[in-house]
């Protein structure tokens, strides 16, 4: 294999690697107990409290994070749901609404809303392994959801199937293989139409503005090609680190990919369909003795991004919440084939499902909603080359391609960069305004 063919998506593979490597550690020496120590409140709370004042919080977080007792109620309070219960959002003078959207195929998804009735709606779509939490995790001073709300938008945060708030189903539980049988295809075919319709019925607006990270962009392509009427219901799309084009672009070696997918295969044979569950990340990465290993892998595979190392606790403990093995497999198929294709089952199943031995292509000429793409210089999944090729070879409705103005900027920096406001959020708003006024120049960076 040539160096050129170094490939592959970063974070989730990186995480798979973490899973594989750390997961192999079975001896008690690898599983130290950490002691309980009383703390002032949930970790989340502390971080936001401090972030809000603009202080440097690196030290206290690293210390605290090593001393969380997994059996304590406080450990549980790391969850976003508990943050809502603890009135965290309210104490920052934001209100929050919970909505439930049931998809055609039975998933009951939670939509979080920072309501501003009468204002134009914006819908934020998280990517692989995360949830709505991604858009608030840096707190009111930095995270995009708050900034959009403050700039007079009605803010909706999706939770797609498989995310921590998208795990209720009418017939299946998370122990059922059927529950985990989805990829970005089902996000686009079932979740997005249900969510977009819900927003439309709750507001007086015919269209919604979309901001999507990573794999959520793929879901939008699925939506607009399979149900083209949704092109009209989306005002436009700003895609952060989109990963629709992966061939020979991502910065992983074929060896990495093979190794990781041997592991995925093993998991599937063991009937274990959830990838990197949150409890796993917490167990492995929040413990002091294992943190450095986690960090090493994370930094290696995610590169050296913008984020404050103090954010690691949030990243492992909360932001990364698990996904399905099938999601990773579908992305791998994009990578292997170089095309934007439906899920490739084996030939017999393809024949039944698609009436052809090979999986069909999504018809991307049906995707008409205007789009702006953004990428980070050092993103190993959504590489500059990969994002450029989306605009050059896949779609003709791209209105601009923008490079985040930082020497190092990685896949998850779109959520957790310490300079996210200046580098990402302000720009998104500026471009949106210009696009609406028809003043956005066509720029490819
Ligand atoms: C929220 O509003 C109250 C009342 O106006 C004010 O006293 C408080 O400081 C505000 N809290 C924050 C975090 O801005
Ligand atoms: C969806 O979940 C919410 C919260 O658990 C619940 O209140 C609601 O009844 C559920 N909807 C359906 C149709 O199951
Ligand atoms: C889904 O939500 C409904 C309504 O709250 C509940 O009755 C049901 O047990 C939940 N299903 C699962 C799998 O959690
Ligand atoms: C894709 O859609 C376009 C526009 O409707 C249509 O002209 C074309 O035939 C379609 N291609 C395929 C392969 O179905």
Image (spheres, grey):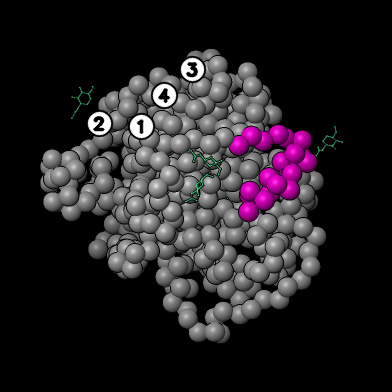
Q: Position of residue 350 (x, y in %)?
A: 17, 47
Per the image, the residue denoted by label 1 is 223
Residue 61 painted magenta: no
Q: Compute the Cα span from label 4 to label 3.
A: 16 Å
Q: Which of disc 4 and disc 2 is earlier in sequence?
A: 2
Per the image, the residue denoted by label 3 is 206
Q: Position of residue 7 (x, y in %)?
A: 33, 56
Q: Compute the Cα span from label 1 to label 2.
A: 11 Å
Q: Which of disc 2 and disc 3 is earlier in sequence?
A: 3
| Quarter of the rendering containing residue 115 | top right
Q: For the point 52% across and 26% down, which residue is it?
A: 199
Per the image, the residue denoted by label 2 is 363
Q: Compute the Cα span from label 4 to label 1.
A: 14 Å
Q: Compute the Cα span from label 2 to label 4.
A: 16 Å
Left or right side of 16 for 310: right
Q: Residues within 10 Å of mark 1 (few under 14, many from 20)?
A: many
Q: Bounds of the magenta span?
A: 79-98
Position of the N terminus, as image quadrant, is bottom left
Q: Which mark is residue 370?
A: 4
Q: Is residue 399 above or below residue 125?
A: above
Q: Which of disc 1 and disc 3 is earlier in sequence?
A: 3
Callout 3: SS:
loop
Q: Which of disc 3 and disc 4 is earlier in sequence?
A: 3
Counting labels gives 4
Whether residue 126 is visible: no
Q: Nearer the viewer, mark 2 or mark 4?
A: 2
The residue closer to the viewer here, 165 or 410, is: 165
The answer to whether the residues at label 4 and label 3 have Cβ atoms under 8 Å apart is: no
Q: Compute the Cα span from label 3 to label 1.
A: 17 Å
Residue 97 painted magenta: yes
Callout 2: SS:
loop
């Amino acid at each position: 294999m040539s160096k050129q063919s170094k490939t592959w998506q970063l974070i989730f593979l990186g995480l798979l690697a973490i899973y594989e490597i750390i997961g192999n550690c079975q001896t008690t020496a690898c599983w130290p107990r950490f002691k309980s120590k009383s703390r002032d409140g949930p970790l989340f709370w502390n971080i936001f409290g401090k972030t809000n004042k603009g202080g440097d919080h690196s030290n206290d977080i690293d210390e605290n994070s090593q001393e969380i007792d997994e059996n304590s109620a406080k450990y549980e309070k790391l969850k976003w749901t508990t943050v809502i219960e603890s009135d965290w959002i309210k104490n920052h003078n934001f209100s929050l609404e919970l909505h439930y959207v049931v998809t055609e195929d039975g998933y009951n998804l939670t939509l979080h809303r920072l309501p501003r009735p009468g204002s134009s709606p914006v819908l934020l779509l998280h990517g692989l392994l995360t949830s709505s939490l991604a858009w608030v995790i840096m707190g009111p001073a930095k995270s995009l959801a708050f900034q959009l709300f403050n700039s007079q938008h009605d803010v909706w945060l999706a939770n797609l199937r498989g995310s921590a708030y998208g795990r209720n189903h009418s017939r299946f539980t998370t122990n059922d293989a059927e529950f985990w049988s989805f990829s970005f295809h089902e996000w686009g075919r079932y979740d997005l139409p249900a969510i977009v319709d819900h927003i439309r019925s709750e507001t007086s607006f015919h269209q919604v503005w979309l901001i999507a990270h990573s794999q959520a962009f793929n879901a939008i392509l699925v939506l607009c090609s399979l149900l083209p009427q949704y092109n009209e219901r989306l005002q436009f799309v700003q895609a952060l680190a989109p990963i629709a084009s992966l061939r020979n672009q991502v910065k992983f070696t074929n060896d990495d990919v093979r190794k990781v997918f041997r592991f995925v295969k093993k998991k599937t044979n063991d009937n274990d369909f959830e990838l990197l569950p949150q409890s796993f990340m917490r167990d492995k990465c929040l413990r002091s003795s294992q943190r450095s290993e986690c960090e090493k892998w994370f930094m290696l595979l995610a590169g050296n991004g913008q984020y404050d190392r103090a954010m690691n606790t949030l990243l492992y403990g909360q932001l990364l919440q698990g996904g399905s093995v099938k999601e990773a497999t579908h992305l791998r198929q994009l990578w292997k084939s170089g095309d934007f294709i439906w899920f490739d089952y084996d030939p017999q199943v393809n024949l039944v499902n698609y009436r052809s031995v090979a999986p069909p292509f999504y018809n991307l000429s049906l995707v008409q909603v205007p789009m702006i793409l953004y990428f980070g210089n050092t993103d190993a999944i959504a590489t500059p080359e990969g994002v450029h090729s989306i605009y050059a070879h896949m779609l003709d409705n791209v209105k601009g391609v923008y490079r985040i103005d930082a020497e190092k900027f990685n896949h998850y920096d779109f959520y957790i960069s310490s300079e996210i406001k200046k580098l990402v959020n302000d720009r998104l708003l500026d471009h949106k305004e210009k696009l609406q006024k028809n003043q956005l120049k066509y720029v490819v960076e």
